[in-house]
Amino acid sequence: MDFNDKLDRLAKLAVGFGLGLKPGQELVMTADIGARDLANRITREAYDAGASNVVTLYSDDDAVLAKYTHGTDAAIDIAPGWLFEAMAGAFNAGAARLAIAGDTPGLLADQDPTRVARANTAHAQARKPMLDAIVSGEVNWNIVPFVTEGWAHQVFPGLTRGAAVDRLWDYVFQALRLDMPGDPVAAWQAHFAELARRRDHLNAARFEALHFEGGGTDLTVGLAKGHRWVGGGNSLPDGTAYAPNLPTEEVFTMPDRTRTEGRAVFTKPAVIGGSIVEGLVVEFAAGEAVSIEASKGVEVARGHFATDEGAGHLGEVALVAESSPIARSGVLYFNTLFDENAACHVAFGNAYAMNLEAGADRVAAGMNESQIHHDCMIGGPEIRVTGLKADGNRQLVMDKGEFVI
């Protein structure tokens, strides 16, 4: 099986299994310009599946940089709200959404971090209507990767760009279960069954909070009243099955925005709007990030997690086993789609309504709302996770980064 065969399999997996695209449905896709080959293959697959229309919006590193190197200072605070409103309109009207992830990490490393933080804030504010539409539970959406030169060079800087791309593709195809003979959908269905087993156990446990400890982290995350664990695939109200992230290794739920306490030492860099934040350490009190420190990129982190009132509170907590294929690879991907599936993590900002039981009151539950949603990894081989119950009982959930439930 050669490279083109694997790309074709990825396109089929994204449209059929990832999106569950319905005949007559419109598809809105976003991608780096370097991922055009995969985008075109996905477009053909979508039309073969009966799509009524496919619209692809491309980004380009040079165009992104030009705003900082040639734009006025006032331009930093402007984002195309009209575009995101139009995309929200498409999703609210029934369109599916697919994102091809492959942006260059560290693209803005040489830019003024204050300007980067301002631009991130403007972008987050502008895209909020689109984010709300996507997480409404009414949209089938999917994110898949494509290896660009900029991404591969960040991951394997010691290799030539061509060799780095080839090396990273090997890991990506492995994580996507596309490097094996046989039907990749069957492999994903078996994997989703295991995620569902963990999800169901956690839902039955009805924990009040989770306590993370290890590697300097000592963090208690209170869970929302009526929280619901989700993992693997999702479904629309009409029963359409879809998989938001490929790859995915997590089970996740909703924290109470007011009940996170303690210290989180983040185990992987955070890529925020083209900047890499390293050595991130956050102190929480009454659910709020009251102290944010980092060895690199602290201004960007502080600006991003102050985008709005909810940006410094948590909207997601997720558990990932150290035995996941992505964690076992030992590769630092500098890409949230992969790094979040290599370690337990929390997300600053907006919570997902799918993580609440039907009919639950969002305010009473402690659901967080924000213009951002950003995952940051706290897991590793030393992490221990304990579930805390309302009656004071404690149950070990993970030890040394592995599930014991």
Image (cartoon, rainbow, N blue to C red):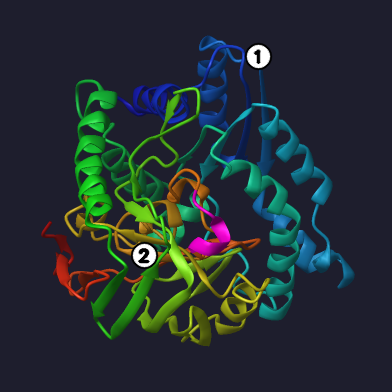
For label 1, the SS is loop
Query: 193 or 60: nearer the eye?
Result: 193
Q: Tell me: 80 left or right of 200.
A: right
* Residue at which label 2 appears: 345
Q: Which residues are magenta?
A: 360-365
Count of all numbered marks drawn on residues in the image: 2
Q: Tell me: 193 left or right of 258.
A: left
Q: Is residue 282 visible?
A: yes
Taken as a whole, is the magenta stretch helix, strand or loop? helix
The quadrant where residue 345 appears: bottom left
Residue 13 position, x and y percent, is 39, 26
Residue 201 position, x and y percent, is 20, 50
Q: Is residue 32 visible?
A: no
State the CA–CA distance, disc 1 to disc 2: 37 Å
Judge the density around disc 2: few (<14), some (14-19), many (≥20) Cα neighbours within 10 Å.
Answer: many
Going by the picture, which residue comes out furthest to the left? 404
Residue 362 belongs to magenta span = yes
For label 2, the SS is strand
**Residue at point 29%, 43% (across, down):** 175
Q: Residue flagged by tag 1: what amino acid is it?
A: Ser
